[in-house]
Amino acid sequence: MIIDCHGHFTTVPASFRNWRAKQVEFANDPVNGPKREAAFVSDDEIREAIGNGQLKLQRERGSDLTLFSPIAGLMSHHLGNERTSLEWAEISNNLVHRVTQLYPDNFAPVCQLPQSPGAAPANSVPELRRCVEELGFVGCNLNPDPSGGNWTGKPITDREWYPLYEAMVELDVPAMIHVAASCNACHHGTGAHYLNADTSVFMQLLQSNLFKDFPSLRLVIPHGGGAVPYHWGRYRGMSLEMMERPLEGLLDNVFFDTCVYHHPGVELLTKVVPTDNVLFGSEMIGAVRGRDPNTGEYFDDTKKYVDACSALSGEDRYKIYEGNARRVYPRLDARLKARGQ
Amino acid sequence: MIIDCHGHFTTVPASFRNWRAKQVEFANDPVNGPKREAAFVSDDEIREAIGNGQLKLQRERGSDLTLFSPIAGLMSHHLGNERTSLEWAEISNNLVHRVTQLYPDNFAPVCQLPQSPGAAPANSVPELRRCVEELGFVGCNLNPDPSGGNWTGKPITDREWYPLYEAMVELDVPAMIHVAASCNACHHGTGAHYLNADTSVFMQLLQSNLFKDFPSLRLVIPHGGGAVPYHWGRYRGMSLEMMERPLEGLLDNVFFDTCVYHHPGVELLTKVVPTDNVLFGSEMIGAVRGRDPNTGEYFDDTKKYVDACSALSGEDRYKIYEGNARRVYPRLDARLKARGQ
């Protein structure tokens, strides 16, 4: 089967986005803010949003199941406060859970965390536990910059993050490292902030001994790892120089998706990063929705680019499309096995 | 001939670095700060620093001439104030000028600008003019984030930058977009901030109509363009979607160097970016100084990676190694011609 490790519910009804805008507007005046019940999305609305969107594209493009999480850009941990972040995380995660209940064959749930600038990462643990233990989520999205592009917090290798990693290890769930919207005009969201975060976080990991402390912690760096595989030689050199260890020492714990929207990029990724560390992902429906006028194909139909990597063996393809996702997300594997898959 | 468009005087004597540290320490107490004369570096010191460093490697690796500028990491526009930035730019540029006088066959000068957080970019014009008109500099390094990793200023497409571009166009000099050190612990300098700046600035350009206003402005994005060529499809899609124009519309004005430290990266760069837009660069002696234990070769010996790109024709190689640099830096071309080259 073909598992897409990176999909967001970007096609939510406008009413849902509007609720969030109102919630943020009244962040410090909760009495007059919107009621939680008003964020309701009906089953029919979900079916319309998904059926005409992600599900349709899954079928057209030939993937089977997507690890599905709330819209990254709308997590916007920098807006509102810790209370609104928690409420919004609960509402968004519950909605994703309903999608996966309506379409259990097609989507498995990944949660957002109730992060907030300056709030202790430990405060995200209860929502992570609720999602995993009560609702069957298989992973989480961890925002390495809750300040939304200003990077006012600490690197994710700082000990303040350790309680969250302890919970992830105990629950045996990985995190995809994924920022939300950018509120800094120098950094476009999907065109710069996303990729820069991937790059900065990888370098934070390279500089640290995080995985000595958490040997079974697993982190997925999306968008093909930002700039990292393209600069693999730079990082190999820096790791040897700064840390006196080969870069490959990170690869028990760090994984990359294939959200790179042209064939030469995916080919480079699969050439320089070991196949065990690459997970198929498309980020659809996401940052780039159009078609390449040269080919008529969707830019984000990344399966085509993987399929065209002629150097990959059948075993490599199995790993990228399915095996690695089952290994990195053991709760996904258990969920699939429970369904006879 | 082989022109390396990207080299910094990273091998300055320790006394020179110490002078800068003192200058910053006494930024608000200039009376007790170090005297300008104390930043003196003798000809012998220059010969030792260059002769055992960049010049030696030029000869070993087979390049002929390097576009040479002050150390990027030491520009540190975020330290001190506008007065110290100007003094430091003048001193650093004068030192680079002396290198190019001692070794006119091997180095051509590129200046740093006296930027400072919050200072108008227009204030950098006099030093640019001095360097170009009085000292024969052929280009400048423009720091898109004088705040050193916090990005507190405006995108480089904002009109506040226009007076600088007007001067660049009038003087017919390009800028390499190059940040200095990072003071934000989330972003390692050479491992993240450099590449992120390249990516963010490219996206700023994509989102703007800067080149409608300055059709002959030329900007070189170093470090192989950060994440950009690896995500070329993403940018092609975003340009069509957001701006309704092909990404290739930027290519009269935007160029990339080859500072990518492994062959697959350089191969991708030369495959997706038209050959007219790629300038040979190595950034040596710079971010990565070691050797690849697998091959015994220096990571930053980028000429080897370009040479190994079998798809490049002889004409392509001429452009990457020489022709494009002469075209993008017309004052370099004039300087070479005046020397019979």
Image: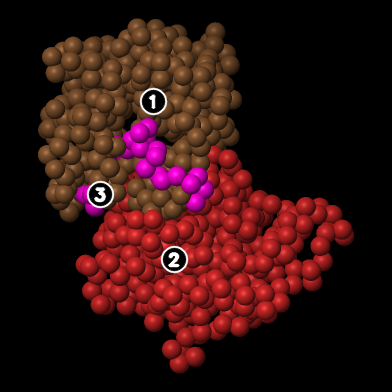
Chain colours: A red, B brown
Task: Pick out the residue farthest to the bottom.
Answer: A340
Picture coordinates of residue A91 (x, y %)?
A: 70, 69
Quadrant for the C terminus of chain A in the image = bottom left
Where is mark 2, residue-wise?
Answer: A282
Residue A297 lies, in percent from the top left, at 39, 63
Residue B242 lies in magenta, yes or no? yes
Image-based side of A172 in relation to A96, left or right: left
- C-alpha gap between disc 1 and disc 2: 38 Å
* Tag in front: 1 or 2: 1
Q: Nearer the viewer, residue B99 or A318?
A: A318
> Residue at point 51% right, 80% down?
A106
- Label 1 in the same subunit as label 2: no
Task: Give the labeled residue for mark 3.
Answer: B271
The residue under the point 30% across, 27% down is: B328
Q: Which residue is mark 1?
A: B216
Q: Nearer the viewer, residue A300 or A114?
A: A300
Quadrant housing the N terminus of chain A:
bottom left
For image coordinates 28% across by 73% down, the residue present is: A316
Instruction: Give, as a three-letter code, the residue at label 2.
Output: Ser
Cα gap from disc 3 to disc 2, whole angstroms? 23 Å
Check the image and report above or below for A315 versus B270.
Answer: below
